[in-house]
Image: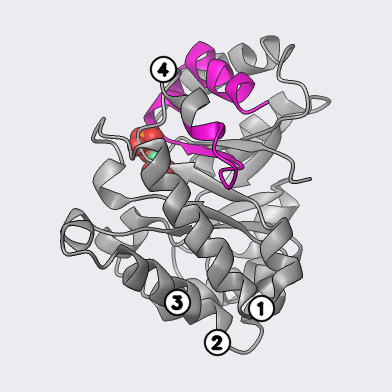
Amino acid sequence: MRQPLVAGNWKMNGSRASVRALVEGVKAGLDGVGQVRVAVCPPFVYLADVAALLEGSAVMLGAQNLYFAASGAYTGETSAAMLMDFGCAYVIVGHSERRALFGETDETVVRKLVAASRAGLKPILCVGELLEDRENGVTEHVVGRQLDSVLHVSGGLEALANTIIAYEPIWAIGTGRTASPEQAQDVHAFIRRRIAMRDAEIAARIQILYGGSVKASNAQELFRMPDIDGGLIGGASLDAQEFLTICRAAG
Ligand code: PGA
């Protein structure tokens, strides 16, 4: 069966001191998390600190972004190999904030996905619709387009075989407004069906996380749904106790 994963996306938050306290808090509360895989994705500048703090623990390290080129004149960017060098296992790709605020397109997202996967990282590919899309009834069209941009590109299916998907409705991110378990389940099932049209085996085993205002109080009802395999947690991952409660809810 699919192993549940709960990943904390810390976004652009923290200081060296607060990051240390957060990691210590998470490490101290892992009892009871059971089979759930736990990961944290700090800002780049804290990766080395967090990697050192996580040594010997079961918590995995992830990054929030990467660039698809291997090396070269790309000021300010970070390659997959560099992330591997710092002990990252995961990397978030195509988060809606990157798409909306930093101009990432389906095309750049898929190039990042393929680069991350080829380098040995496990990409967490984010997809999701705007409120306007949902209100216009085009959620499946939008998420389908985001998936197709991967499924129909050379190397995309191979990368997807090694990818985790995070369904994050944009209207639910950081807004306190969560998708209902049924709304989320419907889209998760749609994602699985869409992938199954290309490869049924990948569709059956791919982990699909839900993200968007997951909290200790709503995690359990979301994770109970059959196609929800864990969560990508933003705001609530900055509080060790709340994050741990969410991790336990995925078990
Ligand atoms: P949120 O963010 O949990 O704060 O809504 C989730 C995400 O953007 O990954």
Mark nearer the N terminus (1 vs 4): 1
Q: Does the rendering let one see residue 12?
A: no
- Specify whether residue 108 is painted magenta: no
Mark 3 or mark 1: which comes first in sequence?
A: 3
Q: Nearer the viewer, residue 250 or 115?
A: 250
Nearest to N terminus: mark 3 or mark 4: 3
Q: Residue at x 71, y 30 (%)?
A: 36
Tell me the CA gap for discs 2 and 3: 14 Å
Assign a secondary structure to mark 2. Answer: loop
Q: Secondary structure at mark 1?
A: helix
Q: Label 1 belongs to which residue?
A: 157
Secondary structure under tag 4 reads loop
Question: Which residues fall within the magenta stretch?
Answer: 222-251
What kind of residue is marked 2?
His
Distance, label 2 to label 4, CA atoms, is 38 Å
Amino acid type, callout 4: Ser
Kindly identify the residue that appears in the image at 37 percent across and 46 percent down: 183
Disc 2 crowd rating (10 Å Cα; few below 14, some 14-19, many 20+) is: few
Q: Nearer the viewer, mark 1 or mark 4?
A: 4
Looking at mark 4, is its residue's CB closer than 8 Å to ligand 1? Answer: no
State the residue position of label 3: 108
Structural distance between the alpha carbons of marks 2 and 1: 8 Å
The foreground one among 237 and 146 is: 146
The circle drawn on residue 217 is: 4
Quadrant showing the C terminus = top right
